[in-house]
Image (cartoon, helix red, strand yellow):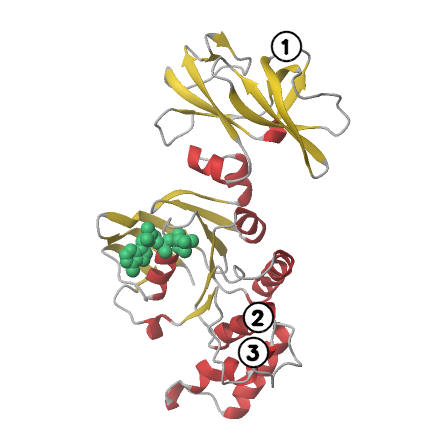
Amino acid sequence: MDLKIRHVRKDYGVFPALNDVSLDIRSGELVALLGPSGSGKTTLLRAIAGLETIDDGEILFGDEDAVGWSVQERNVGFVFQHYALFRHMKVFDNIAFGLRVRDRSRRPAEADIRKKVTGLLELVQLPDLANRYPAQLSGGQRQRVALARALAIEPQLLLLDEPFGALDAQVRKDLRRWLRQIHDETGHTTVFVTHDQEEALELADRVAVLHKGKLQQVGTPDDIYDRPATPFVYSFIGDSSSLPIHVRKGEALLDQTVIPVGSVSGPDGEARLHIRPQDISLQAVGQGVQGRIALLRRNGAFRRADIEIGADRTLIEAQIPPHLEVSEGDQVGIHFERFAIYPSGSRQSI
Ligand code: ATP
């Protein structure tokens, strides 16, 4: 089912938790809502589910306006960060619950419920745990049961709110891959909330980045990482540093010296140059922008250096190849391979 969110607004007191958010999600897509704490992700998910009213805008399920519909009428499957399994029910009964509580006219026969739940236990790879209670499961297993339970009602839409947030890093990674597989097998239109950019980029077909209730950018993981539309997206996704510069007649200047980055389009005035550690290469002193290595440290297979540049000694972080001979205190030349320049105070890139 296609989901269309049009100009949605939600106010809590003085500031909007959602500010004119529009987003189209295609049938079968897995979309991540990504943003820092308080950016409005959960509010948007709850508004889609019908758990939260909206102050303005439209939410369309297919072509139908769902704003007046109850939670039940929306027929969505939910998985939350904190497993909401029924503690006194075995795994099997937890998964069957949504089908058994339907009114008689829509309730499947018990034999069909058994078949369905058995199939779902296979799907979530827990065929032997039907008779356990939630307390007898690991956190990861509980979340799989929660997903099976959400899928049992054959939802039009699957909504996941940080479903793996409470689990440790390795389990989280495994479940992420597993969720993608399940999604590809079942094809549910899925909206997934996370504050973890790695999770969003790895899992989703498209990522919607929220900040202070405003949608910053919607795009594929490559769009978001390689072509961030706003300074917020640039700095929220991946590591980066930024440097205050001045743009004059198509040139970028640092302390009145032209930075060799080619011609810059956009208005003259103060701006910031954003750069990722791996997009910086070191050159001989005298070439490129001049800097001094303030600090060197290990970073996995590479090293990272904090390099001071400019009169106000702004620190930018650079990735250093393992065998390059440099030391703290060295003067170096810096070349910016890839970067983005955003006018100061603007939300857009040049
Ligand atoms: P987190 O990752 O911390 O869950 P989030 O991006 O999901 O954050 P929301 O929970 O949607 O953010 O909250 C968005 C904003 O709305 C926050 O500033 C929050 O304090 C506020 N807010 C959320 N629910 C309520 C409420 N019931 N009453 C008042 N303010 C609320």
Q: Quadrant of residue 90?
A: bottom right
Where residue 272 sits in the image (x, y, percent)? 44, 23
Q: In this view, does 177 lie above or below 331?
A: below
Residue 32 visible in this rendered orientation of the protein? yes
Where residue 95 sits in the image (x, y, percent)? 52, 80
- Which quarter of the figure is the C terminus placed in? top left
Indicate the amino acid at tag 3. Ala
Q: In this view, does 84 lie above or below 14?
A: below
Q: In this view, does 342 lie above or below 137?
A: above
In three-dimensional space, the C-alpha distance between marks 1 and 2, rounded to whole angstroms, equals: 55 Å
Q: In which quarter of the image is residue 343?
A: top left
Which residue is denoted by mark 2 in the rendering?
144
Where residue 30 sits in the image (x, y, percent)? 51, 57
Mark 2 or mark 3: name the one nearer the start of the chain. 3
Q: Is mark 3 on a helix, strand or loop?
A: helix
Residue shown at the point (38%, 48%) measured from the top left: 39
Q: Residues within 10 Å of mark 2 (few under 14, many from 20)?
A: many
Marks 2 and 1: in contact by CB < 8 Å? Answer: no
Which residue is denoted by mark 1 in the rendering?
287
Indicate the amino acid at tag 1. Gln
Where residue 261 sits in the image (x, y, percent)? 54, 16
Which residue is denoted by mark 3 in the rendering?
135
Q: Is residue 116 above or below residue 1?
A: below
Mark 1 or mark 3: name the one nearer the start of the chain. 3
Indicate the amino acid at tag 2. Arg
**Ligand 1: quadrant of the figure:** bottom left
Mark 1 or mark 2: name the one nearer the start of the chain. 2
Task: Say which of 230 and 263 sits in front.
Answer: 230
Q: Residues within 10 Å of mark 3 (few under 14, many from 20)?
A: few
